[in-house]
């Protein structure tokens, strides 16, 4: 657990509790009514953010989902053989204007297109309907080995049916099959996100406490 996360969560706890604390210090028992009003305000705020999250969840149902399929030409063997990668839409919604945008190194930094565009033949897919596959790119087998050795990541850009830009990461390594990482959909709501982080911190503290108490029970 990073110290920055602890400090951020502690800062949010301070911001949420500073108003009731100041009211108690200044008004004493007369602060009960203002504190109730403050809590009602937080409740209305949370309900508004719940509605925002429901809207995001509803729109997420229209996002496509992907898988990849790999094939190698059987007519030629050796380093000059062509390796084909197909992207498969396994969701129920189409993806539009799909293609490779960038290639990232191990640290997630983009590589200049001049260094990889000649070895990798890209395809532009205007529309990828559900339950269909189209070739995303092709590459020679010797160039594919470089892709695996350097653990590069291919970033695929596309648009959903609402015209929103999305990304899909394809991470390659010799130690495991290609990893597909769909773009994370951020949950809106500053208050709800803060409360979730506070709950997570409390659960983490309880788990750490139980782990530290186990040797004493023996």
Image (cartoon, helix red, strand yellow):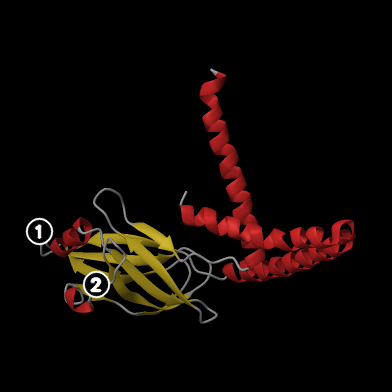
- Left or right: 206 in relation to 142: right
- Quick one: 1 or 87, which is closer to the camera? 1
**Of the residues tagged 1 and 2, which is closer to the observer?**
2
Residue 74 appears in view: no
Disc 2: CA contacts within 10 A as few (<14), some (14-19) or many (>=20): few
| Of the image marks 1 and 2, the number of the one nearer the N terminus | 1
Residue 5 visible in rendering: yes
Q: Residue at x 36, y 67 (%)?
A: 87
What is the x, y in percent for residue 73? 19, 63
Judge left or right: residue 130 versus residue 169: right
- Give me the residue at 31% from left, 65% from top: 108
Residue under the point 42% across and 71% down: 167
Residue on which disc 1 sits: 78
Q: Which residue is mark 2?
A: 111
Name the element at disc 1: loop
Helix, strand or loop status at disc 2:
loop
**Residue 50, percent across and down?**
70, 65
């Amino acid at each position: 657990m990073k110290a920055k996360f602890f400090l951020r969560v502690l800062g949010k706890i301070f911001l949420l509790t500073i108003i009731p604390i100041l009211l108690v210090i200044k008004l004493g028992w007369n602060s009960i009514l203002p504190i109730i009003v403050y809590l009602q305000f937080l409740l209305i705020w949370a309900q508004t953010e719940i509605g925002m999250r429901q809207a995001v969840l509803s729109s997420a149902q229209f996002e496509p989902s992907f898988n990849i399929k790999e094939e190698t030409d059987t007519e030629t063997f050796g380093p000059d053989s062509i390796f084909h990668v197909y992207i498969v839409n396994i969701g129920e919604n189409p993806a539009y204007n799909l293609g490779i945008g960038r290639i990232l190194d191990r640290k997630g930094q983009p590589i200049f297109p001049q260094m990889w565009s000649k070895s990798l033949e890209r395809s532009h897919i205007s529309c990828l309907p559900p339950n269909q596959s189209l070739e995303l790119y092709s590459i020679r087998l010797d160039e594919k080995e470089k892709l695996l050795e350097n653990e590069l990541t291919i970033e695929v850009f596309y648009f959903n049916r609402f015209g929103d830009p999305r990304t899909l990461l394809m991470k390659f390594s010799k130690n495991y099959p290609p990893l597909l990482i769909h773009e994370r959909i951020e949950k809106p709501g500053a208050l709800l996100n803060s409360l979730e982080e506070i709950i997570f911190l409390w659960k983490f503290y309880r788990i750490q406490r139980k782990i530290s108490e186990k040797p004493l029970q023996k």
